[in-house]
Amino acid sequence: MAYFYYMIKVLSILWNSFKMALQELKVNKLRTFLSLFGITIGIFCIIGVLATIDSLKTKISNDLSGLGNNTIFIDKWDYNGGPEYPWWKFVKRPTMKVAEMDFIQKKSTLASNIAFFTSTSATFSYEENQLKGVNLYGITTDFNKIQTFNVWKGRYFNETDFNQGSPFTVIGFKVAEELYGKPEKAIGKTISYGGRRLMVIGVIEKQGSSMIGGFAYDQTCIVTYNYFASIFNPDNVNPYIMVQAKPGIPSKALQDELNGIMRQLRKLSPTQEDNFTCNDVAQFKDQIESVFGAINQGGWAIAGLSLLVGAFGVANIMFVTVRERTSQIGLKKALGAKSSTILYEFLLESAFLCIIGGLVGLFLVWLLTVALGAVLPFPIFIAPSIIFLALSICIILGIISGIIPASIAAKMNPVEAIRTK
């Protein structure tokens, strides 16, 4: 019975505080709006930044996964880049050879899948339709085990296709759409480039654009390496070797093993520096995390200033509210209301005011996500955890802003308060 009475009392305090907050908003619209504007802008800044960064991180993480999870790219180029990138040194390095891939397959104990990759670009056509700048990829057997793409219609290459270098191709969704009108019509048709023809045996599922470059499958024609090497010189198109670690093996361990194997393969003495680079895809994630961390800090700094201004605004509202309701407070205390009840009512009212400002900020962020989603190459979403964070900030800020005015109201002498006009 006592528990039920306590719950009724709590709900009554919550309801009265909520009504007072709405009444304050209704009676003093301009004053309340100006005071809550800082809260709204602060929540808009921090939640807008967090939502955009979370969405961007998700997109880039998916794009990085498309490069291959736990994968090392062995190339003559170092992917770290930078303003002092010594390209003149890397350009002199020998290119990767398919025989080196075979050697790694025999020596490596940590690798699960290994593929050789070459690429160039060409203009492809079908009847009167023509598409420029199409990527032509030459790949070996394990490529589709490392990469994340699905064949939407038709089939992928089989072992015979790889061994014989059959003039077959698996094309991207956009290539099929541009050249054949409807992508499903591409299966069994021929596609031409440079006076040569390929038969389309499969169409890749639509991938969308990538934020980090990588493999643009929508704009791609894939052929087997043996076919590619019969037409082009692989040494002229910067080939590289993709090596994926076995489950449970860290990419760093695989990278160290591959460094040793490649030095052995190329017969480098201990004093000679590497003439290759084992690029770890995971390093890009670390670099991206540091960039996003800096952006987050900037967002929090801007939001912090706005929230601080908003907190002073809400505190000002509560001071004015306490002064305006002094006689009501005295009457409540004379009728038996406890000081703690008065304290809680004003704290909750302050929290509700901040929540209202925060909800307006969240609404503005939602409008922002709709607008940005229409122009950016990835959707913007507001995660439930971000909404919870926003509401938590509002509640904490409301309590901090209202603690002094609420304490003043709770400590009032009922007789003196009733006499106040």
Image: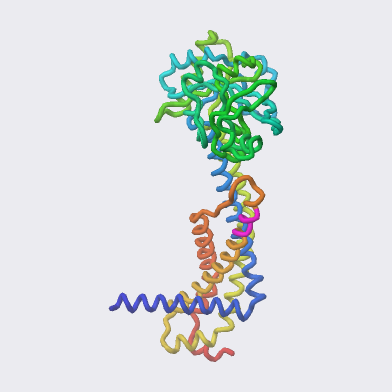
Q: Residue at x 52, y 69 (%)?
A: 351
Quarter of image, res 75? top right
Residue 222: x %, y % from top left: 58, 27
- Left or right of 369, for residue 195: right
**Residue 75 visible here:** no
User: Magenta region's main secondary structure?
Assistant: helix
How many discs mark residues in the rendered view? Answer: 0
The correct choice, above or below, for 395 with respect to 252 in the image is below
- In this rendered view, identify the residue nearer to me: 209 or 281: 209
Residue occupying the far bottom of the picture: 419
Residue 98: x %, y % from top left: 54, 15
Look at the image and give the residue range highlighted in magenta: 366-371
- In this rendered view, identify the residue nearer to me: 132 or 65: 132
Residue occupying the far left of the picture: 1
Looking at the rendering, in which quadrant would you find the C terminus? bottom right
**Residue 194 visible here:** yes
User: In the rendered structure, does residue 82 fall within the stretch colored magenta?
Assistant: no
Looking at the rendering, in which quadrant would you find the N terminus? bottom left
Quarter of image, res 281? top right
Residue 308: x %, y % from top left: 61, 62
- In this rendered view, identify the residue nearer to me: 238 or 228: 228
- In this rendered view, identify the residue nearer to me: 344 or 365: 365
- Left or right of 9, for residue 63: right
Q: Residue at x 44, y 79 (%)?
A: 339
